[in-house]
Amino acid sequence: MITRLRTGAAALTLGLLTAACGNAATTADGVIDYWLWDSGQQPGYQQCADAFQKQNPGLTVRITQNGWDTYWSKITAGFIADTAPDVFTDHLAKFAQYVDLNVLLPLDDLAATSDIQDSDYQEGLAELWKGQDGKRYGVPKDWDTVAIFYDRAAVKEAGISESDMQSLSWNLVDGGTFEKAVAHLTIDANGVRGDEPGFDKNNVRIHGLSSEGSGGGGWGQTQWSAFTGSTGWTVTDKNPWGTRFNLDQPVFQDTLSWYFGLAEKGFMPTYAEMGGANPIGTDKQIQSGIAAMGISGSWMVSTFSKLTDASGTKLDVGIAPTPTGPTGKRASMFNGLADSVTSLSDQPEDAAKWVKFMSGAECQNMIADSGVVFPARPAATERAIAYNQRERDLDVTPFTNQVVDKTTFLFPVTTNAADITALLQPRLDAVYIGEEPVSSLTGLNNQLNALFEVAQ
């Protein structure tokens, strides 16, 4: 879900140009322009739009969907050229920058959204969408955690039981039962497993664990965050709006050294094998036999449920929770999307009505029944769990139990988001590739902390 953000220079340009432009009539009267990037969610939100229009005669919702990269470039261009939509799906990786640039309207000041309560949504979600001024700039629409997807046939062939998969643990000494499973699931070109004598780490046919890159674009969400989180480590001193980064802490660097070391051992694809800066997704790696299992997000449940092998036979994919870590608990980043009203909308009150409807029980239940994501409201989440069990015979509780068990940690929201990603991505890539030692992240940490000083 994450890609690298624009640089600080581009952000500054956007801010200056936006300030120079007044509000523009971006849509016809009564037409609310709504943008999203997930094609899988578009049918569900069209259903919501149809219901909204029936309840609000004279208002029409026009939905535009673009892929991730195109979506954000058009959003940025829209703020510059006064062609931004009335409402758009926002992401926490982008949110802080948009708040800094004053291109989002505070929803507390709009009639329809002024009475939204944090308690309407999963605990902790709504608070993430407030600026440092305490005002709300986004209303939660869904949430996500991470878990392990795995090829049941490969796991069974390796002699690993389903109960073993559900109770994996890891540590910094020997990797625990998690690394043992990853090693045993790894097979070289001669059929030798990763934990057997004669294993050729330079000629691997199937890796035990997939890779989705270095994690620099999203704080390791589907890469190393489940491991760093289960040590008790946090990205910043507080969240949201932290004032100091913690990339210099030994437990973080030791965990990354262990994690990227899996690639050095042949248990996980190298930077080049997984596609470099444009990684092949875990779903494709499992589908093609590059990997037997991998960490990915709950937003991928629908995709994994439809995977087939080369002959067209449906793959039997299982889901297991992230491994228990040194703290004795599991961990998962808790992320989510929200809907925001842009400052360029010429009909903010109508736009707010649409945002309120999308975050309400009626629309949230429709999204639950689409089986694509976990809606932000607790009751709708339960409905989505039931849908997956009933329609897909798929137990998705490894994702939802993280919320129930309170083993989640929040995506870091800070100022200077674009500059941070621009610095973080290449440095983590260099560590993954092996060009730089993990200790080099101490210098990066100093650079990131300097951004806070400039902001002050």
Image (cartoon, helix red, strand yellow):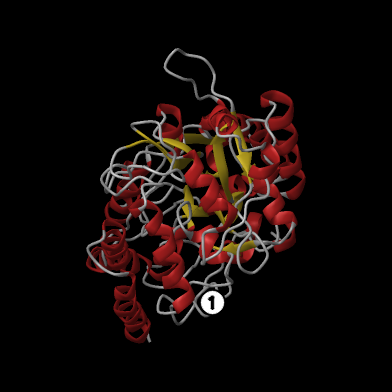
Instruction: Provide the secondary structure element on which disc 1 rests.
Output: loop
Q: Nearer the viewer, residue 88 or 219?
A: 219
Residue 232, image quadrant: bottom right
- Asked whether the viewer can see residue 36, the reply is no
| 3 vs 203, nearest the viewer | 203
Q: Classify residue 5 as left or right of residue 242.
A: left
258 is higher (above) or lower (below) than 278 = below
Quarter of the view holding residue 434: bottom left
The x and y percentages for residue 228 are 51, 65
Q: Is residue 400 above or below residue 444?
A: above
In the rendered image, the quadrant that contains the C terminus is bottom left
Task: Specify the amino acid type for callout 1.
Answer: Asp
Residue placed most toward the observer, 103 or 453: 453
Residue at (70, 36) in percent of width and height: 395
Residue 166 appears left or right of 178? right
Residue 373 versus residue 126: which sits nearer the camera?
373
Q: Residue 101's image quarter?
A: bottom left
Residue ID at (63%, 48%)? 321
Instruction: Decide if residue 369 is on the left or right side of residue 129.
Output: right
Residue 159 showing in the rendered view: yes
Name of the residue lying farthest toward the front: 197
x and y percent of residue 117 in the render?
A: 71, 61
Note whether 174 is above or below 393 in the view shown.
below
Q: Which residue is mark 1?
A: 133
State the image coordinates of residue 180 (x, y, percent, origin top left): 53, 50
Q: How many marks?
A: 1
Q: Badge 1, how many Cα within 10 Å: few under 14, some, many 20+?
A: few
Residue 370 picture location, percent across and down:
63, 30
